Image (tube, helix red, strand yellow):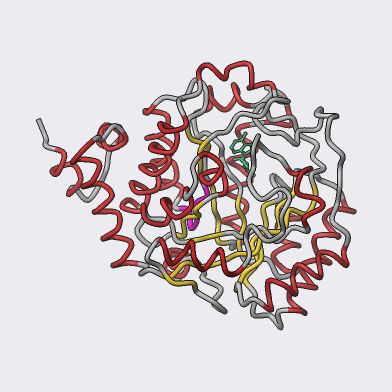
Amino acid sequence: MRTFSDILDNNYFDKDSIVRLLGAQGRDKELLFLKAAEVKQKHIGNTVHLRGLIELTNNCTKNCYYCGIGASNNKLERFMVELTEVTKAIHFINDNSYGSVVIQTGEIQNEQFTSAIEDILYSITKIGKGKLGVTLSCGEQSLVTYKRWKAAGAHRYLLRIESSDKDLYYKLHPKNKKHHFETRLESLRSLQECGYQTGTGVMIGLPFQTLENLANDLIFMRDFNIDMCGMGPYIEHLDTKLYKYKKLVPSKETRVDLSLKMIAILRIMMKDINIAATTAMQTLVDGGREMALKAGANILMPNTTPGIYREQYSLYDNKPGLNEEAEDNKISIEKLIARAHCKPGYGEQGNSKHYSKRID
Ligand code: 5AD
């Protein structure tokens, strides 16, 4: 039988190897994280790139079973951040040299929304004098819409596959036209075709999810040749359909452990992609984001959404930083980065190196 080090030193991880890595404990686990740290240092260094996150609207036409802002949740007040406030947030991001903006929304497909995003993209270009990187995370859209947003200034797009296993996908989403697995794949392909730096990701520790599923998720990312990844633990939300399966959700510790291993393994598999240290990590454990940075992540997305809207953007329970705009201020972000022995990439867009090589 192959030893753990044999597996770790092999250049290509197959599914069985990944399952073994995900199950690593003790010394083996230490070896996995050491290798990931080594790969990170060698290929992308210790700079953490910042993206100021604006959660623009919780309006959403979908009903994903895990998500707190699904259309049928009528306990929420729906909001769209006003343009003046968006502009203020963009100025904040620019003035603090975060380098990039992320606009995240529920999923809405209509002309009014498409052009509202275009307007925001134009303001980002204007305020940042064309120097700010822009990531959109606005769900499945038509190729035409993706092209319009690209032309208006967006560089990157995040669209999580949530799970690459079709059966599991349909345990997380209604089985209807609006929530089609194939449409998600098609959208990801359209994004690549449009020339976006394309990102995807999954939730970790979902009910019904196996280690094999997670291994296949990582293989999916490699096969898809993604440029960026945002993945983190699944967190229950009381007002969602998936909540009733909460007994099937692994413990917090297991979800954190698995999420860190997923990051570390992906870093070894895809050495030069951008990987985010997500807020969900922070929700499950204090210091979750710095743990993610140590495991191989290199992107932080400090929340710059105006405070008054934050409570209405609860994708999951106990999301941190709901009441205070200061949670993700420059000083706390700097401390977090320093604790992870990294440095902030102020004023840099921090584009995916993988993308630059891919299009060369
Ligand atoms: N737990 C963790 N992540 C969640 N997301 C949505 N709901 C949850 C949840 N309950 C993630 C999804 C989505 C991203 C915007 O937030 O992966 O793509």
Residue at the (78%, 58%) spot, across then down? 306
20 with respect to 221 (left or right)? left
Picture coordinates of residue 16, whole percent (x, y):
26, 31
- Quarter of the figure with the N terminus: top left
Q: Which span is picked out in magenta?
A: 226-230
Picture coordinates of residue 186, whole percent (x, y):
61, 43
The question of residue 229 being in magenta is answered with yes
In this rendered view, identify the residue nearer to me: 166 or 54: 54
Picture coordinates of residue 196, whole percent (x, y):
59, 61
Residue at the (14%, 44%) spot, across then down? 5
The secondary structure that most of the magenta stretch takes on is loop
Relative vertical location of residue 15 with respect to residue 125 in this rendering, above or below: above
Q: Where on the picture, by quarter, is residue 121?
A: bottom right
In this rendered view, identify the residue nearer to me: 46 or 130: 46
- Quarter of the figure with the C terminus: bottom left
The question of residue 43 being in magenta is answered with no
Relative vertical location of residue 171 with respect to residue 295 in this rendering, above or below: above
In this rendered view, identify the residue nearer to me: 359 or 304: 304
Residue at the (71%, 48%) spot, across then down? 322
121 with respect to 155 (left or right)? right
Picture coordinates of residue 40, whole percent (x, y):
33, 61
Question: Which quarter of the frame holds ligand 1?
Answer: top right
